[in-house]
Amino acid sequence: MTIIGVRTATLLTLTALAAVTIAPAASATPKSIDWGPCPAGSPPGYDCAEVEVPMSYQDPGGPRITLALGRLPATDQKHKRGTLFTNPGGPGNPGRFSKFKTASLHRQFDIVGFDPRGVGASTPVRCFANDAETEPLKRVLGTFPITAEQETRHTADVREVAASCGRNAGPLLEHLSTANIARDLDKLREAVGEPRLRYYGLSYGTYLGEVYANLFPHRVGALALDAVDDPIAWSTGHRPEDANVPFSTRLGGFRDADRALQAFLDTCAADVRCAFREPGTDLRAKYDGILDRLEATPGAISYQEVIRRTHNALTDEANSPALAEFLQSATKSVSAKAIATPFDSVLGGGGTICADTTNPRDPAAWPKAARDADRESRGFGSYDAYLSMPCAFWPASDQARHTGPWNRPTAPILLLANGKGDPETPYAGAKRTERILGNARLLTLDAWGHGAANRSECVDAALDAYLTYGRLPARGTVCAPDHAPFDAR
């Protein structure tokens, strides 16, 4: 659901097997950040640092953990305007080497990213004591069940993964909520000397920004939230009965995944460059024929693999040529290994997901939700539903979790951006969020895919103007993408 900052494959984390060391108590706030060279193999041009923060902000003098940071310095240091913090999504994506920038922002700002607590080079959550304990995770990564037998095995594997985390992860597992990550971000803002936060967040990074804005409304400078998560759907649901629906179904991404698929098929039918095109053929029926065959008789590639790869490809219109070639190959009995999938991504963050969200405790809720969602969006409904199944068994909770309010007013208006067909963060959720937050404005990209930045000069100019000067696009602005789906990039 976040891949290149997109949450697409799983909400579980395959971590290393070593033990985690929690630092003893020290000062609650870092005085400054001591930037230095990055480790060997890091991307060029970055400075790196580590900062200690409290493991629990309810016990600020207690044990501490380490956050790993990366800084891409402003190219014009003489006229630098300040620091822009970023988060690439997930949750569970390492973020210290930020990929977000425009030429203008890179010139005027130090761009700082960080690996959130529990992730990457920050103090990690380690769920497995030995290689054998990772086997259940390997079986469920990136897949979902479609038969009763598969449901039984999948449920048992997910239960065992959660049990492994309970046995091995230690006390950090109870402090992974986004509220704590937002408090970490506020400590980093203070450490770089910024009186207010300037921030760009993608996908899950929008939820982090929403939590920050409601915990620290008077410290908001400019928050640009791209590919917007509805914070109420994420955390609790809009209705009491939503507590019985897995959070990953509540978000409704499967509906926009289906819309994005139809938009791709419509474009394919009209573009001779599309390898899946077949004049006189209904391409939705052709696609469904692939699924019908594989659901009845799995071949060299599975039903689940077609759904997964199609979903991941739909996160970017630029993947259209590769998706068309893949689907055309899938009409034949070819080996999955022979099909290139440059759009695949495996993500983590199960601890933060389950710490943040209300979910059923009965694992039977997931097969039901999957079947219900599949009636609206074949395959994508099951794909989304099972992403959150670890939360049925999750062995820890975080008392610092934020469940509202979501409408605390901020002096600056928050800038939201979303595409009309986003398979991860649906457009309807972005429109709801514009109304939910205390002070927000939505910018629309007229395209499918996940995330609006770096796909439209119109969007990038709006982000530049907002993050640099606080200028907002006119209410109701709709931007066109720079390229059609099958254009050469």
Image (cartoon, rainbow, N blue to C red):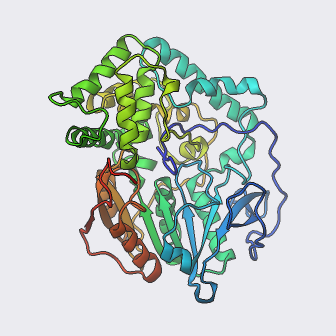
Which residue occupies 48% across, 20% down?
Answer: 335
Q: Is residue 281 left or right of residue 383?
A: left
Q: Is residue 123 left or right of residue 370?
A: right
The answer to which image quadrant residue 33 occupies is: bottom right
Instruction: Say if residue 369 shows up in the picture.
Output: no
Front residue of this view, candidates 8 and 281: 281
Q: Residue furthest left?
A: 280
Which residue occupies 25% across, 69% down?
Answer: 477
Q: Is residue 463 above or below residue 80?
A: above
Q: Is residue 385 above or below residue 473?
A: above
Q: Residue furthest right?
A: 24
Give how far across and how far down residue 22 sits, in percent.
81, 52
Which residue occupies 61% across, 58% down?
Answer: 181
Give how far across and how far down residue 325 sits, in percent.
38, 33
Q: Is residue 153 above or below residue 447?
A: above
Give how far across and how far down residue 88 sits, in percent.
54, 56
Give how far across and how far down residue 300 sits, in percent.
47, 16
Which residue occupies 76% across, 76% down?
Answer: 31
